Amino acid sequence: MERAQNADPITMQRAMKAMSGLTTFLDRSGLERSLLELIEIRASQINGCAYCLDMHTKDARAGGESEQRIYLLEAWRETSLYTERERAALAWTEAVTLVADGHVPDAVYEEVRHVFTDDEVVALTVAAATINAWTRINVGLRTIPGTYQPAAAPIGAAVGTHA
């Protein structure tokens, strides 16, 4: 483990186990893996987490995501490359990630509720909260990016861990 090298390994293990519970929930949420990767990349861009960007762009590419869509994700509003469902999820992710800047706007809430079921909105919110927690862990503990290698798994497979 690269982060907090002097931390008690049991402390790190407990923290990773707690975070893995959120990952397990997302694995079983029914949300598409490709959508979760877009959420993870976009929140990581906003939070400036190089480790998470390295991980999730690699996972997205390994899962079949196009480089063009990954490259343009930061400007998703300016392109027609993303579906209505993806656009609603990205707007939701940004609003939840930037909640301190003015809460989640009603228009974004209505947009996500129009495209997703209530259960899916819960899962989207947990997805945004989870990647935001991971970015803070990785940025805060100075995790070094570049060494992550994705598992050979198709889109729809289990969410990767950040440990």
Image (cartoon, rainbow, N blue to C red):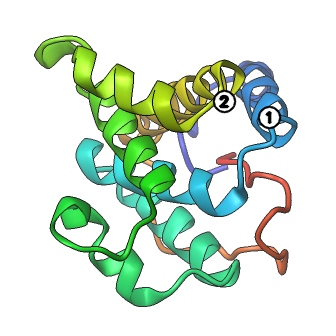
Q: Which residue is mark 1?
A: 29
Q: Is 58 drawn above or below residue 68 in the view shown?
A: above
- Residue at x-position 58% and y-position 25%: 121
User: In the image shown, does 92 or 85 lie closer to the viewer?
Assistant: 85
Q: Is 113 drawn above or below residue 66 in the view shown?
A: above
- Pointer 1 and pointer 2: residues touching (CB < 8 Å)? yes
Residue kind at label 1, given as amino acid type: Ser
Q: Which residue is mark 2?
A: 120
Please report whichever mark, 1 or 2, sits nearer to the chain's N-terminal start.
1
Residue 93 lies, in percent from the top left, at 39, 36
Write down the quadrant of residue 156 in the picture. bottom right
Front: mark 1 or 2 = 2
Q: Are there few (<14), some (14-19), or many (20+) residues within 10 Å of tag 2?
A: some
Residue at the far bottom: name it: 67
Q: Secondary structure at mark 1?
A: loop
Residue 71 lies, in percent from the top left, at 31, 79
